[in-house]
Image (cartoon, rainbow, N blue to C red):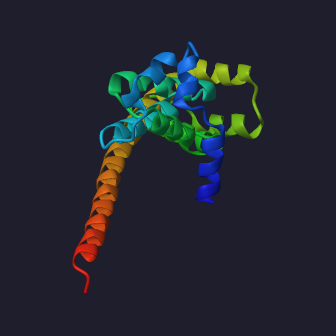
Amino acid sequence: MQTRIANWARANMPTREQMERNRFSAPLAARHELWRFTRRSVPRGVAVGLFIGIFAMIPGIQIVGAAVMCLPFRGNIPMAALMTFISIPPTTLFVFLPGAIWVGNKFGFHADLSTVTTLVSKGAGVGEWLGWLGSDAAPSLVLGLGVISLASAVLGYVVSAVGWRWWTARKRRTRLLRMAARDFPE
């Protein structure tokens, strides 16, 4: 399954050279350090992608926002873009929105979580959602999303940094064992 996904990604993702020819993506593609997988850039890309993916709930904006945020933080753009996919519709509707309202209410706001479930269950239109956001729910939601996205970014940074260190140590240990077996056959 992983090979099928990797093959699909290789076939459909644009190359850096193709992006350099596009006037909008050329500044991002020209900076080679944003595309390398290093021990520093990968955790930064994971953190940026998680933060933008959770905080910016607009699907088209997430990947572009993550790529732009990778510039000052020198994060890995492919990892940041991949991490934005954490906020797919089921996780947004059933995890992040209720969680953000709950966290926002802990800070003294009074957004009603049952209103969100009612709007979701009846398939509310954009006008009804905007009316709900115009109430006391907007500060609660924004503060809750900010706290959840910041906590997720910090946790993602730590987990990916530790995971990177473990993965490279494992590769190094395997390589040393192979070299020792080759140099000192029994």
Q: Residue at x 35, y 45 (%)?
A: 155
In the rendered image, residue 114, in percent from the top left (x then y), is placed at: 62, 39
Percent x, y of residue 90: 64, 45
| The N terminus: image quadrant | bottom right
Query: Residue 167: percent from the left, percent from the top?
Result: 34, 57
Give residue 163's quadrant in the image: bottom left
Does 172 appear above or below 10?
Answer: below
Note whether residue 31 is visible: yes
Residue name at image x 56 percent, y 12 percent:
23
Using the image, determine if residue 10 lies above or below residue 4.
above
Badge count: 0
Q: Quadrant of the C terminus?
A: bottom left
Q: Nearer the viewer, residue 121 or 184?
A: 184
Front residue of this view, candidates 27 and 107: 27
Task: Tell me if 37 is positioned left or right of 40 in this view.
Answer: right
Q: Is residue 28 left or right of residue 21?
A: left
> Farthest residue in the top direction?
23
Q: Is residue 28 left or right of residue 131?
A: left
